[in-house]
Image (cartoon, rainbow, N blue to C red):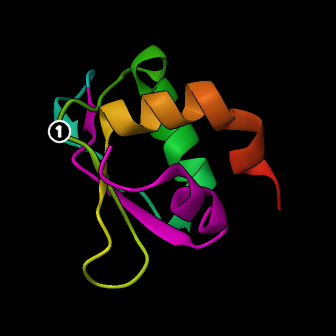
Amino acid sequence: MLATVGAVLAARNNDAEILGVLDLTTKAEVKLAATRLGNAIQFVANASVLGYDVHAAMVFYGEWGTPSLRAKDCEQLWAQHGAALLQP
């Protein structure tokens, strides 16, 4: 994982943008509104059961240069820290 867990948990309420999500029904990229980082991680971690392909997804947050999160990062963070990511 590129980002530290502590940094991600500290930023869980910051704005995040998700890119690279494909709707499996339409085969088109989905335009998602900016959301909290914790919610973005939850979405990407669970997107496959919702009918989305996130193999190329990236979650961007924080200052320029902050490492982005890939789908595998989101899955790991959600599995280990899901409840903490959703806390206000």
In this picture, residue 54 sits left or right of residue 39 = left
In this picture, residue 63 sits left or right of residue 7 = left
In this picture, residue 32 sits left or right of residue 15 = left
For label 1, the SS is: loop
Please identify the quadrant where the N terminus is shown.
Answer: top left
Q: Identify the residue under disc 1.
A: 56
Q: Which amino acid does label 1 sit on?
A: Ala
Query: Where does the magenta region start and end?
Result: 1-23
Q: Nearer the viewer, residue 60 or 1?
A: 1
Provide residue 31's location: percent of width, then percent of height. Answer: 33, 56
Q: In which quarter of the image is residue 4?
A: bottom left
Q: Is residue 20 magenta?
A: yes
Q: Does the magenta stretch include residue 27?
A: no
Provide residue 70's location: percent of width, then percent of height. Answer: 28, 43
Provide residue 74's location: percent of width, then percent of height. Answer: 44, 38
Q: Residue at x 59, y 68 (%)?
A: 11
Please identify the quadrant where the C terminus is shown.
Answer: bottom right
In this picture, residue 40 sits left or right of residue 53 = right
Q: Residues within 10 Å of mark 1 (few under 14, many from 20)?
A: few
Q: Which residue is drawn at 81% across and 53% down?
A: 87
Q: In this view, does 87 lie above or below 83?
A: below
